[in-house]
């Protein structure tokens, strides 16, 4: 063993240098001990991804709810406008059919007892889409014009012939029998053949005969 201080050679198991007297420090033999391992650090990537996905889904649901709240009323209004258009067409065609019946019967309008079978109405002509396509006839005939001659009607431009109604027997006896089902208005066909969308204030005092 060589002394690190004086470089003198000493026996292998010497505890001090024979030359300078320096004390040798014994170094334990054997395999070196491994340093304690540090546990691996867990990654937070999965948690971050889950949080991001949750935020995105919540944002999508919130946006969808806002969009639905905006668009549903618009769609509902557009749908009702389409129904109003169809109803006005029905009233116009039905009014024409009644007046054509009168022309074929010496200017006499149909009887209130048999009007719905005597007049040749086309299929679905008496179905108001707003009233309900499965509820049957959604219109009413002015009972005071039953069997009346067109010549005897004093002012046909203001006397209703046909209108939206859910009155018993589908007959109009007073303006109160008219059903204002289209956003507060009703489709009315007049004795002169014209059709109009009317509010209660428009026909509240109209003569029925």
Image (spheres, rainbow, N blue to C red):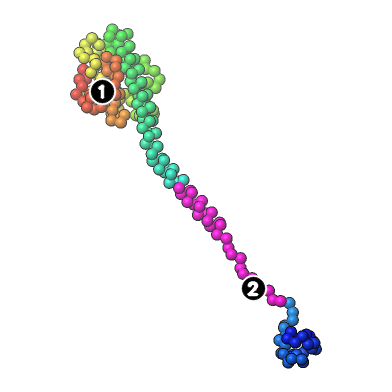
- Left or right: where 49 falls relative to 199: right
Residue highlighted by disc 1: 172
- Report the front residue among 202 and 137: 202
Who's the residue at 39% across and 22% down the image?
124
Q: How many neighbours does mark 1 have within 10 angstroms: few (below 14), some (14-19), or many (20 or more)?
A: many
- Residue 100 in the image, given as x and y percentages of width and height: 33, 11
Above or below, 1 relative to 197? below
Which residue shows up at 21% across the image and 14% down it?
Answer: 155
Q: Which residues are magenta?
A: 32-59
Q: Is residue 109 positioned above or below 40 on the image?
A: above
- x then y, percent, for residue 195: 30, 19
Which quarter of the figure is the N terminus placed in? bottom right
Residue 36 - label: 2
Residue 54 versus residue 95 in the image, above or below: below
**Outermost top residue:** 106
Let me know if residue 130 is in the magenta part: no
Mark 2 vs 1, N-terminal side: 2
Q: Secondary structure at mark 2?
A: loop
Comparing 12 with 194, the one in front is 12
- Does residue 113 appear anywhere in the picture? no
Residue drawn at 22 percent across, 27 percent down: 201
Q: Position of residue 64 (x, y in %)?
A: 44, 43
Q: Residue at x 77, y 92 (%)?
A: 18
Asked which secondary structure carries label 1, the reply is strand
Q: Determine whether, in the image, residue 12 is placed left or right of residue 78.
A: right
For residue 53, side relative to residue 200 (left or right): right
Residue 58 painted magenta: yes
Q: Is residue 109 left or right of residue 2?
A: left
Q: Residues within 10 Å of mark 2 (few under 14, many from 20)?
A: few
């Amino acid at each position: 063993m060589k002394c690190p201080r004086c470089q003198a050679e000493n026996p292998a198991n010497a505890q001090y240098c024979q030359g300078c007297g320096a004390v040798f420090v014994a170094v334990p033999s054997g395999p070196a001990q491994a340093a304690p391992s540090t546990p691996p650090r867990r990654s937070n990537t999965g948690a971050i991804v889950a949080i991001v996905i949750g935020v995105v889904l919540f944002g999508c649901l919130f946006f969808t709810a806002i969009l639905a709240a905006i668009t549903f009323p618009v769609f509902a209004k557009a749908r009702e406008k389409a129904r109003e258009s169809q109803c006005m067409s029905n009233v116009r065609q039905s009014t024409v059919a009644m007046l054509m019946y009168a022309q074929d019967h010496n200017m006499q309008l149909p009887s209130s007892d048999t009007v719905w079978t005597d007049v040749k109405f086309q299929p679905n002509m008496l179905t108001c889409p707003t009233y309900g396509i499965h509820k049957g006839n959604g219109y009413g005939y002015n009972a005071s014009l039953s069997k009346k001659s067109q010549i005897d009607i004093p002012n046909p431009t203001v006397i209703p012939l046909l209108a939206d109604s859910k009155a018993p027997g589908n007959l109009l006896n007073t303006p109160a029998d008219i059903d204002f089902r289209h956003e507060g208005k009703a489709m009315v066909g007049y004795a002169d053949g014209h059709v109009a969308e009317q509010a209660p204030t428009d026909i509240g005092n109209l003569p029925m005969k």
